[in-house]
Image (cartoon, helix red, strand yellow):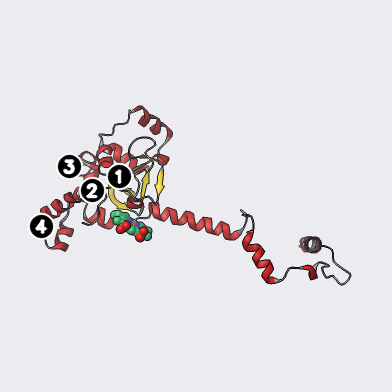
Amino acid sequence: MKTYTLSLKRIATGAGILVALLAFGSSGSADSRGRSSDENDEPDRNERDEHNRNSPAPVDVKDPALKNTAEMFVRGRNIFRFDTFGDEAFWGDTLRLHQAIAGANQGGTGPGVSPKTALAVGLKVDAGALPRNLVGNLKKGTVNLDDPATTLALLKLNAVVGVTGFFDDRGTLKSIGIQCALCHSTVNDCLAPGIGQRLDGWSNRDLNVGAIIALAPNLKPIADLLGVDEATVRTVLGSWGPGKFDV
Ligand code: HEC
């Protein structure tokens, strides 16, 4: 234990000397009273502030404030892109939209939603979330865009912009949620119309929200809320068209 204490002491002394040297070095020449000789030459406060405003300090990537800002930015972007805020309780559990997407062959109901249909109602695919071989096959045109199973594969890859699928251990789609990016992001179509790099903050003007909601097997909760029947809700949703959200 003794050697340990001793070596700590040595380190402390060494560090003290180093700090003193650094302090000396950075203060320019010091006179016999330890005061910096250029202290009197310092510009007055107003002049100095003016100087800082006109020539801001260069970006220091090690600045903790900058690191903190970057972290907050990334966390915020992840929320914007991926956080459903639990709304799968409504879109999935209540309206059962996930069953219509999966289709009867994949544990849901009806024909299911193929990627072609999904793209036709304005949903976007994030090319950045796709594995390289899938990108290659998309370019070659060998991906089956008529099969709802492909839609499920894209959901599993987190590649459908603004939509999150919740799967059980056996790979069955159990619920579905949406996030900000559904309406407030689009893609640059670099692979195909509707398939490309994410453009966050660009409104998705192709999105046919009415048509998407109308796919849900159960519209009773909305019909009850509005005091009309489900058929009326479907008719109104069908009249919205792309880029319309609540008219
Ligand atoms: C179902 C589509 C949809 C979703 C999901 C959505 N928004 Fe919006 N958002 C809209 C529409 C439509 C407007 C109104 C645009 C207008 O009237 O110009 C809007 C407006 C806004 C505005 C005001 C923009 C402005 O210029 O005034 C902000 C901010 C905003 N949304 C943030 C969010 C955030 C954050 C989320 C996720 C928590 C979110 N939105 C989810 C459709 C959506």
Dots 1 and 2: beta carbons under 8 Å?
Answer: yes
Mark 1 or mark 3, which is nearer to you? 1
Of badges 3 and 2, the one in the foreground is: 2
How far apart, in angstroms, are the residues tagged by discs 1 and 4? 27 Å
Residue 118 in the image: above or below residue 243 = above
Cα distance in 3D space between marks 1 and 3: 20 Å
Q: Is residue 56 left or right of residue 5?
A: left
Q: Is disc 1 in contact with disc 3, using a CB cutoff of under 8 Å?
A: no
How packed is label 1: few (under 14 Cα within 10 Å), some, or many (20 or more)? many
Q: Nearer the viewer, residue 101 or 55?
A: 55
Crowd class of label 4 (few under 14; some 14 to 19; many from 20; radius 10 Å)? few
- Nearest to the eye among marks 3 and 4: give it: 4
Q: Which mark is residue 58?
A: none
Which of the marked residues, 4 or 2, is nearer the chain's N terminus? 2
Secondary structure, mark 4, is loop
Q: Which residue is mark 3?
A: 110
Along the viewing direction, whichever of 13 and 160 lies nearer the viewer = 160
Residue behind mark 4: 229
- Of 3 and 80, the residue lying toward us: 80
Residue for point 33% across, 37% down: 193
Q: Quadrant of the N terminus?
A: bottom right
Tell me the tag on residue 123. 1
Q: Is residue 215 above or below residue 26?
A: above
The amino acid marked with disc number 4 is Asp
Q: Which residue is mark 2?
A: 212
Amino acid at circle 2: Ile
The kind of residue tagged 1 is Leu
* Amino acid type for the residue under numbered disc 3: Gly
